[in-house]
Amino acid sequence: MTFAQISNHAMPIGAEPVPESKGTQFRVWAIDRKSVEVVFPDARPPVPLAPEGDGYFAGFAPDVAAGALYKYRVDGGDAFPDPASRFQPNGPHGFSCVVDPKAFEWTDSAWQGIPIEGQVIYELHLGTFTKEGTWAAASERLEYLRDTGITVIEVMPVADFPGKFGWGYDGVLPYAPVALYGTPDDMRRFVDRAHSLGIGVILDVVYNHLGPDGNYLKEFSEAYFSKKHTTDWGQGLNFDDEPCVPVREFFRENAAYWIREFHLDGLRLDATQDIHDESKRHILAEMSEAVRRAAGQRSVILVGENEPQQTVLMKPVSEGGCGLDALWNDDFHHSAMVALTAKADAYYTDYRGTAQEFVSALKYGYLYQGQWYQWQKKRRGAPTFGMPRPGMVTFIQNHDQVANSGRGQRAHALTSPGKYKALTAVMLLGPGTPMLFQGQEFAASTPFLFFADHKPELAKLVHEGRVEFLRQWRSLKLPEMTPCFAEPGQPATFERCKLDFQEVERHAPIYALHRDLLRVRRQDPVISRQGADGIDGAVLGPYCFLIRYFSPNHDRDRLLLVNLGTDLQLNPAPEPLLAPPPEMRWEKLWSTDDPEYGGCGTPPLDIEENWHIPGEAAVLIHPVPFGATAASKHKR
């Protein structure tokens, strides 16, 4: 029996159990090798794989069922894990496990997937989201996330990596969910449960490099890696040099695999600027189409991280783009951090955190769309004109940015409560797609540090590299700061980052603020449209601005006033966007100064003495007819 004769195989490579034949079909690409055989940890004899041409080897092993352990022995020498292993029970150096993906009983047949519009993303790290650090424990928090207002969970990478803890960006077996968090079926149960609660799940995937420990791809072929492209982490993957077709297939099918076998609702693509491909058709375009084919009738989203802000990634494949649905907006984050901390250092050098920056970011997405960028001494970005506003993912925190604070401090610990609440409102009510980082919604006191469990010689290099990276900040390169950096390889560093959900109650005001903002975002008939009927903004002072959300007849417009500075008496007020609709007046709809959020109340803003805008606050107002009684507080 040949691989091509099996009608129900899911992937072009890997181990496929064939229950009706009571065995398993194996196939691997090893173009640099003369022979490959499947070996087992027990007494059963090896199974030789026959060459098929183009570097592929395949064969059928009778009496090998799901759960069996195996490796591939190449050229009669050492044996290595399957590059397309679906599970590594004992880590990336151990035996691979045959998995039957069809054995899981899904209950989400009615789930239609998710579009990018209307979503609120929540980035989490499985190992620190709960004390247990497992899929099963995370499943117990899904109702909490739903009740908070989260609609999409973005899980940091889970492709198998070495050690007992890590961020996941040094994965080495792209098809194998790391055993630290549970089995592949545990992951499926998490997704299935999320769907039952109306929550989508996307996965952070790394297609720009593989980690340094446990990476055995070169044992099968050097051609997996590029001879002409390097990345920030070393040798790039070979997407554009002969023989690259099987490499492209390996990673393209991996993207589809997560959608097909785990019912995921999309992917977040890490550091796409380091996915180098000079082919006429970029590998990301192929991945985009493969993912959507795998999803069938379900809607899926593809979110890219792209430091140089190349908006071509969001253009349709038919127009020469890569077909992504959204991109992370680092510009918004950088402006927010400067506004919150008053520090414009390192990669915050080209930002001032001013009112103008936030007005521009909310209207146009990226701030840098081709202008000169002092920090990098080159032009940065590409135009966003015509791009859908939900395609910009806005955030104040993410895994990288919290860890890069030096001590792993959250943004709320680096600024005043008023500024933090005001910018939280800007992000959560803005027209982009907001993203929260785990624990942000309740102002978690736990840090998020860089941690990675490696063997001693590699751990030393990782620690030194981390210290060197942080030295781009003037203060962090001071000698007295070096002892303050957590050791990435210490278990205590990892343990310190685990969330304490008892803080949801202890920090009730800030949690209530996030919950209520997300409710306004979801339920308000104007805000929920994400600027579909138009938005505009104006600068009222160096750190005070307004954003107006238009409605079809302008009789239900919303006005968000944000003041990151001191109280502002705006008299005169020659700004048309401040004018209410005819025969109407402005009334408060929501405010960061509400007593429930720890504030002291918000007096009327548009008064006879002209506009009085409170300092370090954000206020959402709406029009009501003259003579109408004061509206009750926005329903919660």
Image (cartoon, grey):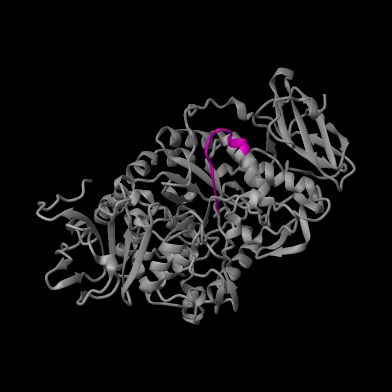
- Residue 421 left/right relative to 390: left
User: Which residue reaches farthest right?
Assistant: 34
Question: Quick check: 143 left or right of 452?
Answer: left
Is residue 336 shown to the viewer in this render?
no
In the image, residue 255 above or below residue 333: above
162 or 597: nearer the eye? 597
- Looking at the rendered structure, the number of numbered marks drawn on it comes to 0
Residue 51 location, x and y as percent?
88, 36
Whether residue 431 sits left or right of residue 603 in the image: it is right
Residue 459 place in picture, x, y as percent? 61, 63
Question: Is 104 or 364 nearer to us in this picture?
Answer: 364
Q: In which quarter of the image is the N terminus?
A: top right
Q: Which of 528 and 72 is in front in this view?
A: 528
Query: Residue at left 40%, top 52%?
Result: 532
Q: Which residue is drawn at 65% across and 38% down?
A: 86
Against 226, residue 348 (above or below) is below
State the residue at coordinates (81%, 45%): 78
Magenta stretch? 293-303
Vertical relation: 356 (above or below) 21: below
Q: Residue 12: give x, y in percent of width and height.
A: 74, 36
In the image, residue 300 lies in the stretch drawn in magenta: yes
Asked if residue 265 lies in the magenta stretch, the reply is no
Specify whether residue 197 is in view. Answer: yes
Q: Which of 109 and 1 is in front in this view?
A: 109
Q: Where is residue 499 in the image (x, y as percent from the top left)?
A: 39, 52
